Image (cartoon, coloured by chain):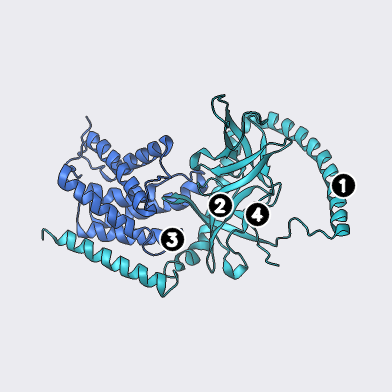
Chain colours: A cyan, B blue
Amino acid sequence: MRYSFLKTFFFLIVVAIVISLFDRYFLNHKLTQVGPVIIEKPASYIFSKLESVNFFTKHVLNFMNITKESDDLKKENLNLLSQMADYEDIQSENSFLRKSLNVAPRFKGDIVYADIFISQLGPGGYDTLITRGLKDGVTENAIVITEERVLVGKIEKAYDSFSRVLAVSDPEFKVTVKVLGTDTSGIAKGALEKGMILDFITQKDVIKEGDNIVTAGVDFFPPSLVVGAVDYVEINENDLFKKVRIKPAVKDVKLSRVLIIKNNTE
Amino acid sequence: MTVKKLIIILIFLFILDNFMLPSLFGWKESTLSFIALIGSVVYFGFKKSYLIVGVFFSFILELLRGADFGEFILPFLYTILVVYIFQKFFDIKQGHYDKNIAKVLGLSFLVVLFVYVFEMFYNFDLNFKLWSFSAVLTTFIESFIFLLIVTWPKNTKFP
């Protein structure tokens, strides 16, 4: 009786170790993959509906600011329309020059839609699962974005029918970014609830709170994906680099539906 | 607390932590599932039934989070071993015998400590990813609320 707890305990440890070794070497980690396959459809439905309720509630609570926000958005919209016209001109010129000089397009990934059905913090970082996997052509390191071209993360591990996403706020996540409208660039790393930290910003680099951060396109992330906005800048003349914190844009958009830019191996 | 009631509480907390908190409230920094697993054994004591329920729900969590088999079960078991050894030296006043709010606060702090022991066994290093003031505070508050819920009988004593 006295040692019955310990006996049960050691029995469970031995059984767990044996089954996990069996799963690893004989089943190729398929023992627990059945769980996400069963729950992904109902879970993604629940996730999307509850997220809609969340956003609706935020809008209702923000009701008092609606008029001011509407005016600000109209101005921003006009500004963006003129920028888009310039962008289309440049894009068509760029495409023509690339064809003429026989240079491969910068971004040539196929897109596939996916739903997020689990997204919560775990002991190893965020556990974010999506409803697409190897069967849908999704492979590791494929980029995950929203329809608004906001960077969500990259595929950390792809299973048959689902995949695990390494979110932008995960400590293991890194991306080379630049500050929109300036030459300042650095490496953004995930910092869990703090968002992201931007490293290698020297004291001479131009950066301020509110600046928009986008992917630089010099690593395997496509360029001009929205990462976030600068939330906090600390300047200390005794340090080599400034301390910069980014609020990820992914916190302000709906995540229930995302796009995966597949890796095309040509 | 019967095993049946514990199972119902764990099911409710798992649904809350894995489905409702991230989507309905946008709260993706919760460790409630792990607090519930470890807190159950810390508070209710070392009974075979609670251990088996804990292992079963660790397996359910692996299914929910797409983790490999043993990824949560083994760290949970190692953590319970640490709690057992800790109990031998420090004699945690487990809830069956004491329902004082001050003791619940103390137990909440212990549960937070064991959640970090769990993380240490999970990552096999001392580089705690969840170690920040806000993360510790959040874990403590969640742990306190969990223990308050499970210890809410009629004769709970307030200081």
- Relative to residue B151, is residue B15 depicted above or below? below
Give me the chain letter of mark 1.
A
Mark 1 element type? helix
Tell me the tag on residue A220.
4
The amino acid sitting under disc 1 is Asp
Residue B91 visible to an observer of this rendering: no
Q: Are marks 1 and 3 on the same chain?
A: no
Distance of label 1 from label 3 (alpha carbons): 48 Å
The amino acid sitting under disc 2 is Lys
Q: Mark 4 and 2 residues: CB-CB less than 8 Å, in contact? A: no
Residue at 30% from the left image edge and 60% from the top image edge: B55
Residue at 26% from the left image edge and 64% from the top image edge: A12
Q: Position of residue A255 (x, y in %)?
A: 59, 50
**Mark in front: 1 vs 2:** 1
The amino acid sitting under disc 3 is Ala
Which residue lies under the disc numbered 2?
A49
Which residue lies under the disc numbered 1?
A89
